[in-house]
Amino acid sequence: YQWGAQLEVGSFPTSYIPTTDAAVTRAVDLASMTGANFSSWYRQDEGTIVTEWALGYDKLGAYVLSISDGTSSNIIRSVYYTSSGASDDSTVVVGGAAQCILSGTSQLALSTRYKNAFAYKLNDFARSASGAAVITDTAGTLPVVNQLGIGNGYGIGILNGHIARITYYPQRLTDAELQALSTP
């Protein structure tokens, strides 16, 4: 007897898809955190997010980590990379208006591990990617948010890759700390 077998077309196994007599397509696995699980640790007025991640099999535009209200109108993107993989950025949007966009300009490579440290505070945003010099923006407000998306942004921009680590600090770390934390 055999039960639970599943044939995969892709290059790696996915979660089990229970079926009966008809083919079924599994919905995308989305990792998110909402409610008290989110609000118990998240600090609205300032914080620092450190991510360590790698692109998997493509360079389609995606989020590594996002904190939002479930829309693109109010969001903190600690890392988002463009569809060509030509750059990645950390962005804050409030009411549909960008408050800061801190962009990297290097071409991202598949299967390469990257580290990013992004800090936010009213009128005080900073980012260091892979140990590079810190870039800052000193004007901007913060959105009211209620959820964390891991490897996605409010259900879209799904990361085809791997997240090795996410660390959250409930304070705006110094620029020197950001650079040290993002050094591979």
Image (cartoon, rainbow, N blue to C red):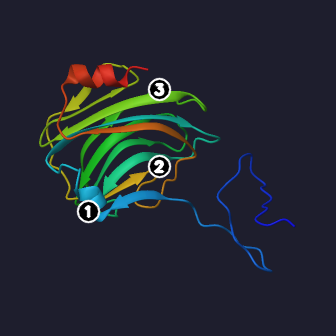
Tell me if residue 146 can be seen. no
The residue positioned farthest toward the right in the image shown:
1
The residue positioned farthest toward the front in the image shown:
1
Snapshot quadrant of residue 118: top left
Q: Earlier in the sequence, mark 2 or mark 3?
A: 3
Position of the N terminus, as image quadrant, is bottom right
- Figure disc tally: 3
Label 2: which residue? 151
Measuring from the top left, give residue 111's x and y in whole percent: 60, 31
Q: Which mark is residue 164?
A: none
Snapshot quadrant of residue 179: top left
Q: Amino acid at mark 3?
A: Ser
Q: Which mark is residue 106?
A: 3
Q: Given contact means CB atoms under 8 Å apart, are the residues at marks 2 and 3 in contact? A: no
With respect to residue 169, does 75 lie above or below? below
Q: Residues within 10 Å of mark 1 (few under 14, many from 20)?
A: few
| Residue name at image x 33 percent, y 40 percent | 90
Q: Residues within 10 Å of mark 2 (few under 14, many from 20)?
A: many
Q: Given contact means CB atoms under 8 Å apart, are the residues at marks 1 and 3 in contact? A: no
Label 1: which residue? 36
